[in-house]
Image: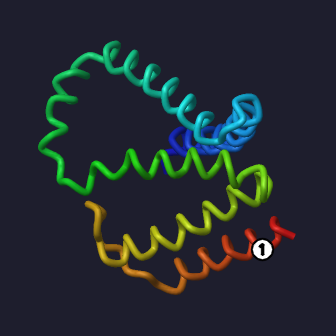
Amino acid sequence: MPYAAMIATALVGASLAVQIGLNATMSRHTGSPLAASFINFAIGTVALLVLLFAVRGGLPALAQAPAAPWWAWGAGLLGALYVASSTVLGPLVGGAAFLALLVAGQMIAALVIDHYGVLSFPVRPIDAWRIGGALLVVAGVFLLSR
C-alpha cells in the first residue's frame, strides 16, 4: 500500500475540516457566504497560478485543456458548490457531521461510479464488502450527527 499517499490524503482531509471554520469566519466578516467562497477561490486560483508557473511544463499542459470532454469542465462548478456549501452548511450541522455527511455522499456516489465505470474510472462492481463499508460510513454519519 502507498502509505505516504494515504497519510498525505488524511492530512488533506484534516485541512478540509479547518477550511470549513476558515470559510465560516470569513463569511461572518464579509456578511456573505458567497463573498467568503469567492475569496477562497480567488486565493486558491492565485496559489495554483503560482504553482503552474513554478512547475516545469505547466503552461503546455494547460494548453491541452480545450481537448477535454465538455463534462470535465464541470469540476470547477462542483468545487464551487463544495466551498459555498461548506461555508453555509458546515456551521449549521457542525464540522464533524458535515464532513461525515460529505464522505457518506462521496462513498455512495463512488460506488455507483465504480460499478458502472463512468467518468474515466475502471469498472469495479459493487459487492458485499463494498456495501458493508458504505453502511459503516453511513452508521458513522448517524453517530456523529447525534
Q: Is residue 17 above or below residue 110?
A: above
Residue at which label 1 appears: 142
Residue at x 82% of width, y 71% of height: 143
Q: Is residue 127 above or below residue 48?
A: below
Residue sitting at the far right: 146
Residue at x 36% of width, y 77% of height: 115
Residue sitting at the far front: 31
Q: Quadrant of the C terminus?
A: bottom right
Image check: 126 left or right of 116?
right
The residue type indicated by label 1 comes to Phe
Q: Residues within 10 Å of mark 1 (few under 14, many from 20)?
A: few
Image check: 17 left or right of 123?
right
Taking depth in this image into account, of 92 and 16 the one nearest to the observer is 92
Residue at x 41% of width, y 76% of height: 112
Residue 118 percent coordinates (x, y): 28, 69
Residue 63 percent coordinates (x, y): 15, 29
Residue at x 38% of width, y 45% of height: 76
Give the structural element (helix, strand or loop) at label 1. Answer: helix
